[in-house]
Image (spheres, rainbow, N blue to C red):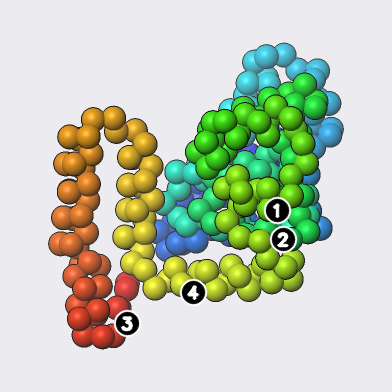
Amino acid sequence: MNIPMIKELNEIIREINEDVGIHFIIIQGMGQNFCSGADINWMKEAGELGFEDNLKDSLELAELFHQLFYSNKILLTGIRGACYGGGIGLAAVSDFVIASSESSFAFSEVKLGLVPATIAPYVVHRTGRHKAKQVMLSGEKLTPPDMLNLGLIDKISDPEQIDTEIALLIENLRLGGKRAQQTIKQLISDLGNITDWRDVKNYTAEILARARSSAEGKEGVRAFLEKRKPNWD
């Protein structure tokens, strides 16, 4: 990862999020490794910059994870090879993560005297605070089973089967209503910010009522009763 790549990704994700015709985002690496962490030259340059310039770069990176996590698209990530630092951040913001049985992981920042700050909120969201603290403090190498136990990946697959696994997952996801899935993502996100259970009661009742009275909801129930596939738009 480097700042030109991060800026380009931010621009692309912004365009995708505004495109109502797109429902899925798939993230994979082009080479043998998913993401080996920050670009060495970028890190060297960052060490020569002051606080304000480093803050600008850090905000760009934080924006990338924010955009992906709060996107109403379904985000699927396939990991092969090394996945370090910010690469784990991309996994943590994803809805579904399939990793190769041969992949390796590490929160390597601490061994460079750095902090995985911009990915921390999303890692904690998946793992819980204590487990996140342990792996970030140690910087130890993690195996796919380790990551599965932490909740940072959802499935382990043979490297050559990852594309097939993602295709099958999308095929299954297409059976659901697009607007219902978008609402589910928003619902889960919102529930983390509501502290009063009276507000939760009202909010969830309104969500259900809107879904039941929507064209998609009516078509889904009608198709179920008529024992046919729904005609999603």
Residue 213, given in percent of the width and then of the height, sits at: 15, 62
Q: Nearer the viewer, mark 3 or mark 1?
A: 1
Q: Nearer the viewer, mark 1 or mark 4?
A: 1
* Residue named by callout 4: 171
Q: Nearer the viewer, mark 2 or mark 3?
A: 2
Res 100 label: 2
Q: Residues within 10 Å of mark 4 (few under 14, many from 20)?
A: few
Mark 1 lies on a secondary structure that is: helix
Mark 3 lies on a secondary structure that is: loop
Q: CA distance from mark 3 to mark 1?
A: 37 Å
Is 89 in front, or is 48? 89
Disc count in the image? 4
In the rendered image, which quarter is residue 23 located in?
Answer: bottom left
Q: CA distance from mark 1 to mark 2?
A: 7 Å
Sequence-wise first label, 2 or 3: 2
Q: CA distance from mark 1 to mark 4?
A: 25 Å
Does the residue at mark 1 contact the one at mark 2 (Cβ under 8 Å)? yes
* Residue named by callout 3: 229
Quarter holding the C terminus is: bottom left
Amino acid type, callout 4: Glu
Amino acid type, callout 1: Pro
Residue 154, given in percent of the width and then of the height, sits at: 57, 56
